[in-house]
Image (cartoon, rainbow, N blue to C red):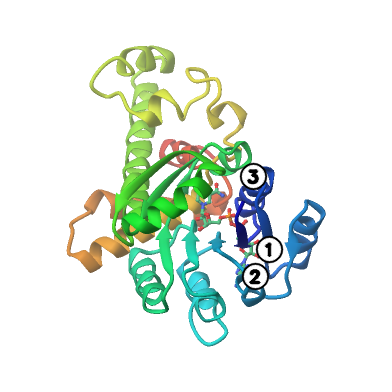
Amino acid sequence: MAKIGFIGLGNMGAPMMKNLLKAGHQVAAFDVVPAAREAAAAGGATACASAAEVARDAEIVVTMLPAGEHVKAVMLGEAGLLAAAPKGCLFIDSSTIDVASAREVAAAAEASGHLMVDAPVSGGVGGAEAGTLTFMVGGSDASFAKALPILEAMGKNIVHAGGPGNGQAAKICNNMLLGISMIGTCEAFALAEKLGLDAQKLFDIASKSSGQCWSMTSYCPVPGPVPTSPANRDYKAGFTAAMMLKDLKLAVEAASKAGAAVPLGAEAAQLYTLFAAAGSAGVDFSGIIRMLKGDK
Ligand code: NAD
C-alpha cells in the first residue's frame, strides 16, 4: 500500500480521498479550510498543517483544486510541493485546469526529478463517492503505469490520452461538445413546444434518429422522457451551469492559444455567461432551456 498525500478536500476531493483510505492506502491530507482537515482526520487520514508537510514523506500526491492558479501556487516555488517531495514522487493532478498550466507544471515536475500526470475526471460528486469516476490521463507511459492502480481505487474508466496536458485537452473537448449539444437539444425541445409537438413524441423520434445525443437520451432537458435527468427535479444540479461555463471558457481560451476555430463553443460560453449572470450559476446546466424558452 502506498503513502499518499491528498490536497484539496472539497466536494470531489473528500470522497476521492475516502476511496483511497478504503483501498488500504495511508493518506496525509491538507486543505486550506480547517473543517475539511478535521473531517479528513475523523475519517482516518493524517491531517497536515501545510501542503509541503503532505509531500514530505509521500510516494504519490493527488491534487483536487479549483483552477490552474491554485495548482501552480501549491506545486511551484520554494514552498511548493515539487521542492518538498522526495525525488521520484508521482504527482496526480485531477483538477480541471487549463492545458497550458498543466503542461507548465508537468515540465517543472520532470525538471525536479518527479513524475506527473494530469488526470481530470468526469462523473461528478456521485461518481467520486461511488469510486466510478472516468479519468482522462496525460503523461508519460511510466507515469501512467504508476498512477493506474491509484486511479483504479477512485474510478472505473481510466484512459491514457497521450502526453502531458492531453488529459485536460480531452476533458475540455468533451465538455465543449456537451455544452453545445445541450444547447442544441434545448433549442429543439423549445421549438417543438412552440410548434405544438409533444416533448415525449420528439424524444421517441429523435432518440432513434440522427438527432440522437447524450444530452437528449441520458440527460433530457425537459421533464418526463428520462426520469433520472435534473429536469425532473426542478434542475437541481447535477452539473452546475457555473461548472459548464468554467469548462467552456477553458476550451475557448485553449482554442485561441492553439489557433483553432470554435465558434459554437464560444457561443455556448456566451449563453452560459448570460444564464449564470441571471442568477442561475448554481442551477443544473440543462436548466438553460428555461432561458432559451424565455421562462422565468
Ligand atoms: P471544491 O471547491 O468543492 O473543492 C476545492 C477544494 O480545494 C476546497 O476545499 C478548497 O478549500 C481547496 N483549496 C483551494 N485552494 C487550496 C490550496 N491552496 N491548498 C489546499 N486546498 C485548497 O471543488 P470541487 O467541486 O471539489 O472540484 C475540484 C475540481 O474538480 C475543479 O477543478 C472542478 O472543475 C473539477 N470537477 C468538479 C466536478 C464536480 O461535479 N464538482 C466534476 C468534474 C470535475
Residue under pointer 2:
54
Marks 2 and 1, how far apart at CA:
6 Å
In the image, what residue occupies the spot 45% across and 48% down?
148
Q: Quadrant of residue 191?
A: top left
Label 1 environment density (alpha carbons within 10 Å; few <14, some 14–19, many ≥20): many
Q: Secondary structure at mark 3?
A: helix
Q: Does 234 appear above or below 84? A: above
In the image, what residue occupies the spot 35% across and 33% down?
187
Which of 227 and 116 lies nearest the eye of the viewer?
A: 116
Ligand 1 within 8 Å of disc 1? The answer is no
Q: Secondary structure at mark 2?
A: helix
Q: Does 81 appear above or below 58? A: below
Marks 3 and 2, how far apart at CA:
18 Å
Which of 206 and 112 lies nearest the eye of the viewer?
A: 112
Q: How many marks?
A: 3
Q: Is residue 15 left or right of residue 178?
A: right
Circles 2 and 1: CB distance less than 8 Å?
A: yes
Marks 3 and 1, how far apart at CA:
13 Å
* Three-letter code, disc 3: Asn
Q: Quadrant of residue 134?
A: top left
Residue under pointer 1:
29
* Three-letter code, disc 1: Ala
Label 3 environment density (alpha carbons within 10 Å; few <14, some 14–19, many ≥20): many
Residue under pointer 3:
19
Q: Is residue 197 visible?
A: no
